Amino acid sequence: MGGRSSPAGWRRRAPPPPPLLLLLVSVLALATVVEGRFVVEKNSLRVTSPAALRGVYECAIGNFGMPQYGGTMHGVVVYPKANTKACKPFADFGLSFNPKAGGLPVFLLVDRGDCYFTTKGWNAQTAGAAAVLVADDRAEPLITMDTPESSGKEHLENITVPSALVSKRFGDDLKTALENGDMVNVLLDWRESLPHPDERVEYEFWTNSNDECGAKCDMQMSFVRDFRGVAQVLEQRGYTQFAPHYITWYCPEAFVLSAQCRSQCINHGRYCAPDPEQDFTTGYDGKDVVVQNLIQICLFKVANESRKPWLWWDYVHDFAIRCPMKEKKYTTDCAHGVIKSLGMDIDKITQCVGDPDADEDNPVLKAEQDAQIGHGARGDVTILPTFVVNNRQYRGKLDKRAVLRAICSGFEETTEPDICLTQDIQTNQCLENNGGCWLDKNTNFTACKDTFRGRVCECPVVNGVKFVGDGYTHCEASGVGRCQINNGGCWKETRNGKSVSACSNEQAKGCKCPQGFKGDGVHGCEDVDECKERLFCQCKDCSCENTWGSYECGCGGSNMLYMREHDTCISELPSLNSFWDLAILWSRSHHISSFSLVIARQSRDFVGGMGVHVGYLLRPRFRGSWSIRRLQISATELHGFRDPRDHGSVHAAGEPGDVEPPTARGPRRHLKQQGVLSTYGSSSIRASLTASVAHRRGRVWSCNFEFRKDWPVS
């Protein structure tokens, strides 16, 4: 694949002339920033007091420590009486910034200059500060406080407090307020430092296969080892979309044929990397690093095409262990061994790598160089390593917990995976006072939903039933099945084996006391005393007795029956005239044109049934204003009666032919009597009575009455 295939390639070389060496290093460094656009990543700082400083200010996130991405931090600003640049331990001056019990965390304000930013951060942290604010010493746009390249790295991995650079003007204002004795309360806010548009986070890891670049390379390898499992779970479950990237530089055309460019670059100076040891006289060359970077990019492309992009993490982890530079195993042959152990297609990867000695562009590395250029809110990638989350560069320590926090802050609220809600990543605000949200203490259903950024009060969905409400003071089950969930939050009671509920699945939401009860349906329903309130059973012969949720109504006398629908008592064996009286009653009160009545009487050996059917047959000229309707109040299941709505006689088992069923217009056989029953106004009403008798362990009487109304209408 173009790199050295055995430790024999690792050799000592004659040093180049010193002027050329210095010139080449300078040229490669300049090539990284030509036409570059570096973006300073920022967070906001809100001053809540004193009133003169109240407002929101920008500050630049330091590239060390652990910014609280997605979160906030309250504190009080303190400016030290001595060691204002924090270049020495504060213990040497007898100063401590540990907060008192119940006090706010201390944000230590220090001055820029005289030592590394990381030194200031470390000294502030060891003195008890919760965050470091560095005041710029010159009037200029905000810059990124980066980590040192060589010396000053001894504290890099141990700094955990967040840091931020503030402008000189704002720093001076803070100092003035403190000198005047004001308490300066501030809120550091990282909630909008990274975009969080949807339920998937896209992130990039700009890295390097070089393992001999000092503390940064050691931190990078440790991060890969620690973060690998988390990254693979997020990728496999579709929560993230990950892509690794590698920085390369080009050699200026004037130096392409120089020995230095030939040793540090491939494809005739198009793609270069710095010498791993920063010493051209010993160890591996920069082009060896470029080749291994290219292998790792191609491995990711092949793995991604096979829908297993997470294999990249396994390869990089194993390659660092099996093929280190220190053991002179940083070779293509060693890389092939790792690829084979992962069961990947070496031929596809080799084809992707191409020929490093060809005088032509490599499409993979060309795409990497193009990707280094910033687009939109993301600036150029110039720092190694660099993490990019949702197209914004991460700032801070390359640490599993810190990076995971940044990724979690990139999810739209309420869509983050469970791994983002663990106690070591964030605090569950629902554990204290239920987050101020609605809670049903009977079922422990709650509207409080823990999120990475805090909590939201959102009515829950339980067993497919959605609760609706504001989430703060009220939530109630809605839709089909809501009554199965805590009875929809409605009242319910059981007495003597009878259960009554104010919840009905026919209603999408709400509680309503059923008939016979009154109340709000939520806190309770009480029985309505229909007898006492004179709501029913008020006829002349009625006697009322209240029951739970209803009433019982009886009629005086042994031959009287109570008709509940009409709240009246009638005789069990009515006369023919009473039928007409009943017809007049019903036609007036219910506006009906026909009715049927079945009255049953049963004794030890007798079952009697009598049906009455009264109907108006209108003259044809009334068709435009009258309709013939039929109302049946019948006991069709008595002894297997068929539906009498066809105007035929009601039969029991026996001889149905005893009576000829009437047709629509045909003649009827009348067995009993026919005549004028009564006169009402100017109308004449004619009736025919048909009776049939059938024997089946008793007797059934069936009576059909037909009334014709034929008075003129003006």
Image (cartoon, rainbow, N blue to C red):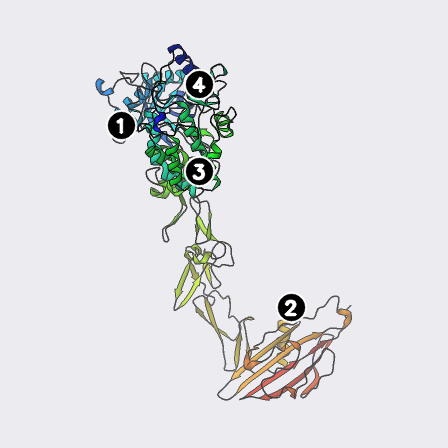
At 44% from the left and 18% from the top, the residue drawn is 261
Q: Residues within 10 Å of mark 2 (few under 14, many from 20)?
A: few
Q: Is mark 2 on a helix, strand or loop?
A: loop
Mark 1 highlights which residue?
99
The answer to whether 543 appears left or right of 584 in the picture is left
Which amino acid, mark 1? Answer: Pro
- Indicate which disc, 1 or 2, sits on the residue closer to the N terminus: 1
Residue 53 lies, with reference to residue 636, above or below; the image says above
Give the camera-side residue of 63 and 150.
Answer: 150
Contact, CB < 8 Å: mark 1 with mark 2? no
Which amino acid, mark 4? Answer: Cys
Residue 533 lies, with reference to residue 596, above or below; the image says above
Which label was assigned to residue 430?
Answer: none
Contact, CB < 8 Å: mark 4 with mark 2? no
Mark 2 highlights which residue?
591
Quadrant where the N terminus is found in the figure: top left
Q: How far apart are marks 4 and 2 (CA)?
A: 107 Å
Q: How crowded is mark 1: few (under 14 residues within 10 Å), some or many (20 or more)?
A: some
Q: How many marks?
A: 4
Q: From the viewer's perspective, is the residue at label 3 or at label 1 nearer?
A: 3
